[in-house]
Image (cartoon, rainbow, N blue to C red):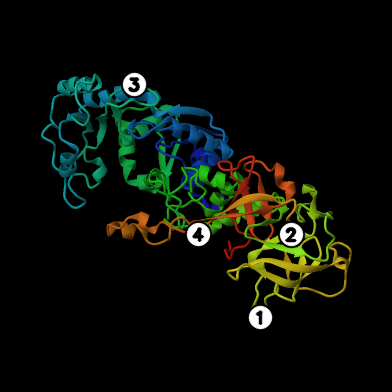
């Protein structure tokens, strides 16, 4: 992240230089109620990156205060994602580690006359809260005595009341212009088994109450979050002060990451998974970290993308092509280059000796000689792309058509002599001739051809499946549509995946899940870890080779 684009870095540097802080402690605090997505990656990079830069520490902390939505599966997935992105946390923490202290701090608020047990229902509390232009009304239970509130709060903990029967509310100001300060709920009853504490608790702190306490307990100096929490900052500071926490963290907000053609809401992502619009949380069409990993994105490309997107308070939407740009840049020198045929059309080279196989040598990456060379078999029958032949081509079409000559990558010139069709008139095979004098690498300087085709040898090619992706969501003004009552599922792209059966070079037989390759003309591909079998390799296209996007 460039210093001139990162106002948070400026704040931290000023705090250290002025003596306001003598160290930097940050945290990445996801709720384990879903898988992380690219927006969380921005928070991870910021929190871990800033702490590393200032020789500080970063905790990975799970804000697990809602047992109804959280699960150990999500905890494990989040830990894997953070580690895969290249970061090591200094401490692993859970909000549930502090439930006893949070309970005691809430009791302290009651003793100070700063909290009370309320019997109003959730709907009644909402109706009493007022609006942005009208003050709220005080609950009829607001003036219970300290003794009664302490007794009721203890009985809540002991399980004497049902779910939703009572809540504990902070006692602040029902007429505050900031609605978040109108006696917010800080504890609720939920008779549910917690993934970490089991059935020990039946009351749970609200996130807005628990979060500042967690930061203070852990000695966090800079609590970095997204701008939707800016209105909550006065309550954050109130909790830290009124609960008499020794450490006082500073909350700093930045604009969250938004991408075109992408759903970034965890709730909506879960809906796509639960209703089977996608192949699980790691579907390559999703912006989840696990989905991006399965598709073939590298941690380096994601980190570089986040850095280039910058850190500010201004809301903006980043073109998804920018993320694609960085994975292309990262793989350009890393990925071996090879040939794959996605839509096969057989060619018989009629003047090539039957039964003969010759081996051609090619570099694995012409821009990176360190990746070595490979041997490619060539014989009488090969496959090319269906799209590389037209029987009646337009002008300036330089690939195969009757009577035209093209170059085969790393091999020879071939000329189309005959077109074979089935009973329905579909082209099923081409008969061509080759010129043995035109072998690649021999210094042939005769006639020129304008078209170069990739191919694979039909006798030794390996079957492979190719999965090509388009954006899952057709872009539009989603907030505006939701305000009009429209469902985001109406924008799901029915053509977001195309599955093709083709062939690859035989030297690819040892490719492993998550290996990445550049297929000539088609783009960068990743061996899918979920569907690849011993019988067939499955490739996810990460990105095409070229883009019109400019940084």
Measure the C-alpha gap from mark 2 to mark 1: 26 Å
Query: Which percent across, then down, holds residue 514?
Result: 62, 43
Asked whether, in this view, residue 130 is left or right of residue 514, the answer is: left
Question: In the rendered structure, which disc, 4 or 2, sits on the residue that comes first in sequence?
Answer: 4
At 80% from the left and 48% from the top, the residue drawn is: 372
Instruction: Please give the residue where the numbered disc 2 appears in the rendered image.
Output: 382
Inter-mark Cα distance, 4 to 3: 45 Å
Q: Position of residue 49 (x, y in %)?
A: 55, 41
Residue ID for mark 3: 100
CA neighbours of label 3 inside 10 A, class few (<14), some (14 to 19), many (20+) = few
Q: Are marks 2 and 1 in contact (CB under 8 Å)?
A: no
N-terminal of the pair, mark 4 or mark 3, is 3
Determine whether 450 is above or below 323 in the image: below
Query: Which of the marked residues, 2 or 1, is nearer the chain's N terminus?
Result: 2
Residue 521 position, x and y percent, is: 67, 61
Q: CA distance from mark 2 to mark 3?
A: 71 Å
Q: Are marks 4 and 2 in contact (CB under 8 Å)?
A: no
> Of tags 4 and 3, which is closer to the observer?
4
Total numbered labels placed on residues in the image: 4
Task: Kindly identify which residue carries mark 4.
Answer: 319
The nearer-to-camera label among 1 and 3 is: 1
Query: Along the line of sight, which residue is nearer the eye, 155 or 314?
Result: 155
Q: What residue is shown with label 1?
A: 395
Q: Is residue 220 visible from the viewing direction of this image? A: no
Asked whether the viewer can see residue 464, the reply is yes
At mark 1, the secondary structure is: loop
SS label for mark 2: strand
Extreme bottom residue here?
395
Mark 2 or mark 3: name the one nearer the start of the chain.
3
Of labels 4 and 2, the one closer to you = 2
**Marks 4 and 1 in Cβ contact (< 8 Å):** no
């Amino acid at each position: 992240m460039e210093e001139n684009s990162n106002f948070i870095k400026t704040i931290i540097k000023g705090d250290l230089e002025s003596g306001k802080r003598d160290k930097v402690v940050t945290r990445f605090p996801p709720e384990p109620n879903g898988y992380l997505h690219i927006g969380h990656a921005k928070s991870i990079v910021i929190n871990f990156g800033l702490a590393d830069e200032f020789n500080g520490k970063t905790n990975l902390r799970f804000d697990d205060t809602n047992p109804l939505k959280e699960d150990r599966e999500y905890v494990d997935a989040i830990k894997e994602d953070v580690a895969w992105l290249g970061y090591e946390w200094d401490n692993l923490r859970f909000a549930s580690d502090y439930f006893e202290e949070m309970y005691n701090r809430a009791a302290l608020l009651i003793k100070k006359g700063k909290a009370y047990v309320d019997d109003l229902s959730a709907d009644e509390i909402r109706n009493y809260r007022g609006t942005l232009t009208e003050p709220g009304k005080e609950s009829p239970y607001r003036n219970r005595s300290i003794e009664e509130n302490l007794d009721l709060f203890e009985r809540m903990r002991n399980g004497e009341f049902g779910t939703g029967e009572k809540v504990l509310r902070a006692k602040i100001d029902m007429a505050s212009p900031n609605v978040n300060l109108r006696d917010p709920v800080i504890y609720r009853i939920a008779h549910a088994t917690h993934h970490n504490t089991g059935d020990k608790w039946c009351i749970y702190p609200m996130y807005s109450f628990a979060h500042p306490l967690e930061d203070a307990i852990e000695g966090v100096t800079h609590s970095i979050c997204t701008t939707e929490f800016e209105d909550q900052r006065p309550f954050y500071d109130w909790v830290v002060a009124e609960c008499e926490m020794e450490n006082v963290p500073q909350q700093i907000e930045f604009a969250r990451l938004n991408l075109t053609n992408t759903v970034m809401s965890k709730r909506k992502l879960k809906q796509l998974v639960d209703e089977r619009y996608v192949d699980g949380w790691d579907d390559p069409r999703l912006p989840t970290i696990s989905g991006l990993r399965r598709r073939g994105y590298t941690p380096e490309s994601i980190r570089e993308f986040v850095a280039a997107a910058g850190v500010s308070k201004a809301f903006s939407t980043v073109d998804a092509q920018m993320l694609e740009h960085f994975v292309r840049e990262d793989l350009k020198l890393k990925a071996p280059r090879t040939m794959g045929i996605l839509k096969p059309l057989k060619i018989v080279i009629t003047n090539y000796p039957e039964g003969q196989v010759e081996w051609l040598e090619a570099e694995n990456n012409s821009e990176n000689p360190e990746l070595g060379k490979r041997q490619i078999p060539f014989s009488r029958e090969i496959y090319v792309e269906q799209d590389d032949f037209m029987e009646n081509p337009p002008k300036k079409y330089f690939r195969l058509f009757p009577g035209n000559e093209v170059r085969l990558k790393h091999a020879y010139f071939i000329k189309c002599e005959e077109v074979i069709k089935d009973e329905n008139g579909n082209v099923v095979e081409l008969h061509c001739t080759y010129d043995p004098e035109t072998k690649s690498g021999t210094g042939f300087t005769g006639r020129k051809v304008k078209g170069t085709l990739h191919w694979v040898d039909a006798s030794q090619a390996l079957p492979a499946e190719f999965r090509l992706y388009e954006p899952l969501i057709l872009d539009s003004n989603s907030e505006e549509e939701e305000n009009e009552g429209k469902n985001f599922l109406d924008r799901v792209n029915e053509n977001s995946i195309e599955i093709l059966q083709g062939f690859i070079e035989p030297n690819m037989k040892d490719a492993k899940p998550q290996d990445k390759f550049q297929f000539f003309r088609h783009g960068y591909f990743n061996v899918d870890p979920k569907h690849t079998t011993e019988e067939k390799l499955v490739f996810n296209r990460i990105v095409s080779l070229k883009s019109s996007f400019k940084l």
